[in-house]
Every structure is written in structure tokens, then in C-alpha cells.
Amino acid sequence: MHFKTIFKSLKNKDMLKRVLIIFGILVAYRLLAQIPVPMGDASTFKEAVSNLMEKSDFSSFLNLISGGGLASFSIILVGLSPYITGSIVIQLLTKAIPRLEELSNDGESGRRKINQWTRMLTVPLAIVQSIAYIFILYQSVLSANISTDFVPTAGDWVLSVVSMTAGSVILMWMGELITEQGIGNGISTLIFASIITQLPNTMGALGASLFDTSQGTLNLFGWLELPVNPTTFWIVFGFAIAMLIVIYFLVKLNEAQRVITINYAKRVHGNSSYGGIKSILPIKLIAAGVVPVIFATAFLSLPALIGQVVTSVDPGNEFGQSLISTFSAPSANNFASLYPDGINGRWFVYPTVYFILVFAFTYFYTSIIFNTKEIADNLQKQGGFIEGVRPGAKTAEYLSKVVNRLDLFGALALGLIAMLPFITDYIFIVVTGAPIGLSISGTGLLIVVTVALENLRSVDSRALMITYDDFSNESED
């Protein structure tokens, strides 16, 4: 990364404008997270949300990716989940329906139409999820015997659903505005901001536990006594070291790439000659980035949501309870209630399905963003070729083999990294009898590191482009 170049590029008005627009959108996003849903007394529903988050790790994850929108019962409670689900559906249909596949390959105009259909699908999905969330929360208020005199009317329901749907659509629009600035993917950036905003609360709770000396202080080697809780200190120290190691390998995996040399045939036009040069085609080890993790988590959240709706209608329904217990990530919050007799076969269902989905979505999304046939055709039109490989179909076949091999290792690596929190939980269950509860923070760490690297790379690329003339003048001098 060229950090000096990045800081230098901020003197450019266009670059500074883009950065300020993104920061302004993120500030507006955080303000939206504080606007409550117009549904009776917000504090009543916040209490119901707290009860749900204690019972369900699924609810905790929703709160994480909505930037605390669930806990504050704000209009962005639904978050970006409808848009992500709509994107998955449209992309699956694109691969299944030849007409849509042709449209996606029809340049920018085709992609715009597909994006428009994704937006249109987001609205009904947001309406359905808004109704489901409001219904679940209201039933939770009733079942938990939380004191309230509020009985929602049809108008209250309509107003609440409309406001939550509007909040989801506004987030989608904000994500697209960020993407248009050319500095990273907007949806990923909003999810990144959602996770980052939860860190102060986490750090505050950790600090309170660390400096709680009611059970003694830390004595180092008999000559230094620190006013911190010894147990918490060593746990924090151990996980800090583990986190640094994981971040290091995440950065290495995210930056790893296979470089293919492209040769361009020499052409003579009149008295001038063109081509006869070499270029490179870099193929990333994990070209899909963090998208497979986001897709897999969003996909796995649907069964738990259905289970929540079913149990809200019929609290004793075994099918709903089974969906919640099977598709809720094992954590410290739900382990005692879901697995009173310790680990059983159901504990492994969520991690296994999660790994399979991450693996499958890595292949799926890479095939969308890296179209080997299109790249081979473009190389052939430009007179480019890979040494030892014939242009056209053979080049596409060669690139497909390379991408598939990279995807195999990349998907396994991404899946194993996503599994690290579950592996840690399993070890703690065997040793101490209960998990430590890192499933969500592990997923969050994966998203934060990957999105941060992608956005930093985008900023670096644009900064180099803006300051290119300055570099040229310096080299001439």
C-alpha cells in the first residue's frame, strides 16, 4: 500500500469529496440506527429484544449486522438482509435461466437491468421480514408478561412495516451511493461499519471485567502487582495473541494471487508498430472476498427466522423449536438451554452447513465476477495470448482450470477460518463444559479484516490514478 500517496491524494478536490461523501453517509446511517420504529413505547420493545437476544444467537447476529438497530428497535432493524437475499436469488436465477445469463453478459446495460430487478425484489422481501420481526417482538412482549397497555391497531402495523421497509430501502440506496464513489463495495462497507460500531460496547464490558479486582490482582513474577483481574487478563492476553495470528493469515490469504503473463502480438500499421509487449493477469486466491461469508450467514438466518415466527404463534410447536435449535449458532448464551446434556449431534449441524455454504458460495460468486469466457474473448480481440495456450476457447478452458484450483484452496481456507470460532468453542466445551462464545466475533473479525483490505486497496488504486501526473513529473525531473 502507498500510504504517502493516499494522504497526498486527499489534496485533490475530487478524492476529498468522495471520502467526505462516504463519511457523511456513514454518519447518516448511524443516525438512522437511533430512530425508533413508531410502534407504541419503544422501551417496551427494547426489553423484548433483550430477552430475545439472550435466548437466540441469531438475534445477536441480526443486531451485529444492523449496527445495533435491533437492540435499539430502530427503523433499520431489518437492515440489508432483504437486499442480500434478493441478490442471492437473482444471481441463482441468472445461472439457471439462459436469457438472464445473456443479459448479464450484455455489458453495462444488462447489469443495470439485473440490478434494478434486485432492487425491486428487495422491497417485498423487506415487507415480509418487517412483518415477521414486528410480529415476533410483539408476541415476545406478550409471552414475557412485559407490562404494556399498548394494543397495536391496523394503522400501527402498517406504519411500522412501512417505516422498517423504508429503512431497509434507504440502506440499500446508501450502499449503492458508496459503491458509486469507487472506494470499495457499499454493502460490505455498511456491514463493516455496523460491526465496528459495536466495538465500544464490547471494549467497555471487557474493560470493566479486566479492572474488577474483587477477586484479587495480578502479581507478575513476585515483583510487580497490577490492578487487574488475573483470570481476565490472561484470557484477554491469549486471545489478543490468537487474534493477531488470525489477522496475519487473513491478510496473507486475502493478498495471495496467481499472476499469469499475457503477451500481446506485434502489429504494424503504416510506419508505426503496436503491441509486442507483456502484461499480467492477477487472479486472487479468494476472488470472492467476504461475500460468501455474508451470503452464507444470511442464508442460514432464514430457517431460524421461520422458527421464531412459528414459536411466536404456537409457543409449544416442536417444528419451530427444532428450527431455532438446529439453525442457531452454538454460543455461550444458548448452550445451556439448547444442550443441557452437553454436546450432541445437533451441535455440529450449524457449523457443518455453514462451512458447506461458505465453500459453495465461494465457487458460485467467483464464477460470476470472474467470467473466463469473457476474459478470453477480450484478450483475443486485443491480440493478447497466454504463452503455450491457443487464444479463444482454449484460453477460457485454461483460465477455468486455474480459477478452479485456486478456488479449491481458497474456499477451504475461507471455510476453515470461518470455523475457527466453532473449533474454539468445542475446545472450551470439552475443557470447561461451556463455550466461550466467539462465533459472532469470529465472523465479524473475518468481515472487518477482508472489507478493510478491499477498501484500502480501492483507495490506494484511486490515489495512484489521481497522483499519476505528479509521479510522472517527478520522474522527468
Image (cartoon, rainbow, N blue to C red):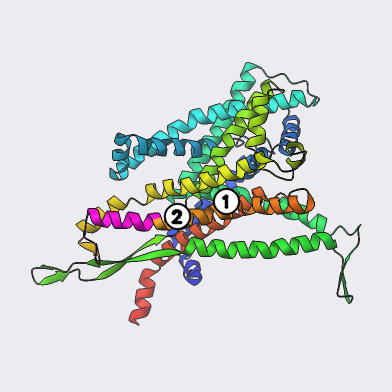
Height in image: 10 above or below 401? below
Determine the residue positioned at 72% across, 43% down: 343
In magenta, the rendered stretch is 387-404
Q: Residue furthest top?
A: 154
Q: Main secondary structure of the magenta part?
A: helix
* Label 2 secondary element: helix
Mark 2 and mark 1 residues within 8 Å of each other at the beta carbon: no
Q: Position of residue 44 (x, y in %)?
A: 75, 30
Is residue 133 visible from the viewing direction of this image? Answer: no
Q: Position of residue 59 (x, y in %)?
A: 66, 38
Is residue 353 visible from the viewing direction of this image? Answer: yes
Looking at the rendered structure, the kind of residue marked 1 is: Phe
Looking at the rendered structure, the kind of residue marked 2 is: Leu
Determine the residue positioned at 45% across, 31% down: 121
* Label 1 secondary element: helix
Q: Is residue 383 left or right of residue 375?
A: left
Determine the residue positioned at 59% across, 29% down: 130
Q: In the picture, which quadrant includes the C terminus?
A: bottom left
- Is 397 a magenta residue? yes
Residue that numbered label 2 is attached to? 408
Q: Please name whichever residue, 343 or 97, is drawn nearer the observer in this view of the structure.
A: 343
Q: Which mark is residue 477?
A: none
Height in image: 395 above or below 293? below
Determine the residue positioned at 38% across, 78% down: 474
Q: Residue furthest front?
A: 345
Q: Please name whichever residue, 305 or 430, is drawn nearer the observer in this view of the structure.
A: 430
How far apart are the two marked residues, 2 and 1, measured between alpha carbons? 26 Å
Q: Which mark is residue 192?
A: 1
Give the quarter of the image for residue 79.
top right
